[in-house]
Image (spheres, rainbow, N blue to C red):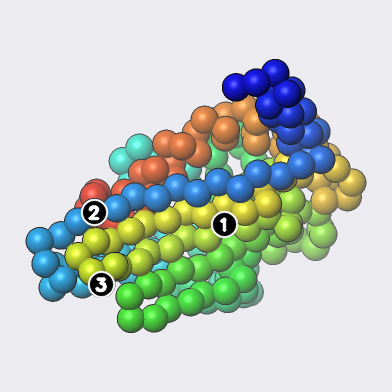
């Protein structure tokens, strides 16, 4: 890597750290099956896995807690719907991170839902209760292509929430989470989840 490229990379990392730049990051797992019938059966199981958000907390290797809430802010075990919420609590960090489900898409061979950071629906604050800004998004997806099943976690516009009113009193903490524990932890967490969605891991 040339000196100019190294300088540009360091500059970008500094801008990410200070909340002036964002990142995109995708995790993907794939599992091949003996035939399309087996792949279709795995896809059907994957649909249940994808939408059973509360069960993600039980996956081996995932230490975060995921809790689904309905539009009224009540805990629910049902299938997610647009404008439902997910509370995420990371290990070792006793703060809540909230996302709102923006959209859900399904067809014969794929399904996904996309979330954005949001305020805590259980109180009246308009501060974004997440270490990324509200413009960030995360898409959880499964897709069957012939005899192969894919699991995805797609992060877009992952910009640290450490500026202006969005961050409230959490600016410094959000920076530590996003560039500290989370930077390395997400590789493990989302890798485990996408393995699960693709059928490489069946236990939850």
Q: Quadrant of the N terminus?
A: top right
Left or right of 143? Residue 37 is left
* Tag shown at residue 31: 2
Q: CA distance from mark 1 to mark 2?
A: 22 Å
Q: Of label 2 and label 3, which has the lower sequence position?
A: 2
Left or right of 127? Residue 100 is left
- Please name the residue that numbered disc 1 is placed on: 138
Residue displayed at 71% across by 44% down: 22
Residue 21: image location, x then y, percent: 76, 42
Q: Of label 3 and label 1, which has the lower sequence position?
A: 3
Q: Of label 1 and label 2, which has the lower sequence position?
A: 2
Residue displayed at 28% across by 61% down: 149
Q: Pick the residue in front: 196 or 29.
A: 29
41 relative to 33, above or below: below
State the SS at label 1.
strand
- Please name the residue that numbered disc 3 is placed on: 44
Circles 3 and 1 in contact, beta carbons < 8 Å: no
- Callout 2 environment at 10 Å: few (<14), some (14 to 19), or many (20+)? some
């Amino acid at each position: 890597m040339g000196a100019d490229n190294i300088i540009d990379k360091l500059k970008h990392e500094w801008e990410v750290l200070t909340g002036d730049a964002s990142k995109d990051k995708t995790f993907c797992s794939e599992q091949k099956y003996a035939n399309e019938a087996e792949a279709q059966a795995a896809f059907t199981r994957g649909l249940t896995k994808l939408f059973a958000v509360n069960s993600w907390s039980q996956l081996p290797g995932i230490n975060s807690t995921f809790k689904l809430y309905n539009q009224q802010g009540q805990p629910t075990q049902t299938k997610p719907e647009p404008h439902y919420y997910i509370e995420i609590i990371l290990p070792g960090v006793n703060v809540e991170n909230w996302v709102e489900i923006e959209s859900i898409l399904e067809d014969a061979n794929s399904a996904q839902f996309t979330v954005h950071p949001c305020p805590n629906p259980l109180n009246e604050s308009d501060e974004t209760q997440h270490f990324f800004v509200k413009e960030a998004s995360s898409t959880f997806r499964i897709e069957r292509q012939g005899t192969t099943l894919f699991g995805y976690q797609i992060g877009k516009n992952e910009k640290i929430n450490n500026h202006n009113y969005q961050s409230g009193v959490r600016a410094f903490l959000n920076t530590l989470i996003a560039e500290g524990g989370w930077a390395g932890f997400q590789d493990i967490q989302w890798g485990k989840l996408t393995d699960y969605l693709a059928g490489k891991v069946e236990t939850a």
